[in-house]
Image: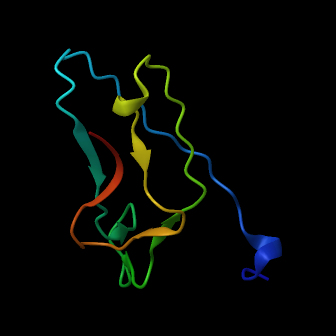
Amino acid sequence: GTTGEANKVPYVSFAQVQDVRGTNAGWDLQVRMTDFKATKETVNDTLLGAEISLLSPRIQYEGSTTVNAPVAHTSGLKLIPNASAVSVMTAA
């Protein structure tokens, strides 16, 4: 089969931010997604209803000032094709 917990394939990805401005001005890392498209033109070249869920975020902060540490999104954040960008990590 192709559905159910037994068939889920975990994919580990990460984003790295290095703020060297020295101003502690903060930042907001956002992502957005476009349609899933086939690599060549076919009758059904767009995968309709597809979405990506970002699960179990983890921050590895190596700065010396915890007030500047970034905050991750909540687990289960969904990326929907052609929707607005969403924040995945921010720092004050």
- The residue depicted at 49 percent of the width and 28 percent of the height is 61
- In this view, the residue in front, 47 or 28, is 28
Question: How many tags in the picture?
Answer: 0
Q: Tell me if residue 25 comes above or below residue 91 in the rendering.
A: above
**Quarter of image, res 27:** top left
- The residue depicted at 54 percent of the width and 44 percent of the height is 13
Task: Report the side of 6 relative to 18 (left or right).
Answer: right
- In this view, the residue in front, 61 or 15, is 61
Q: Tell me if residue 81 comes above or below residue 90 in the rendering.
A: below
- The residue depicted at 42 percent of the width and 31 percent of the height is 16
Provide residue 19's location: percent of width, then percent of height.
Answer: 28, 22
Q: Tell me if residue 81 comes above or below residue 62 in the rendering.
A: below
Q: Tell me if residue 87 comes above or below residue 12 in the rendering.
A: below
Placement of the C terminus among the 4 image quadrants: top left
Provide residue 70's location: percent of width, then percent of height.
Answer: 39, 38
Task: Report the side of 44 relative to 82 (left or right).
Answer: right
- In this view, the residue in front, 75 or 66, is 66
- The residue depicted at 20 percent of the width and 14 percent of the height is 22
Task: Report the side of 62 relative to 41 (left or right).
Answer: right
Provide residue 52's location: percent of width, then percent of height.
Answer: 48, 67
Provide residue 6's location: percent of width, then percent of height.
Answer: 83, 73
- Residue reaching furthest right? 6
Placement of the N terminus among the 4 image quadrants: bottom right
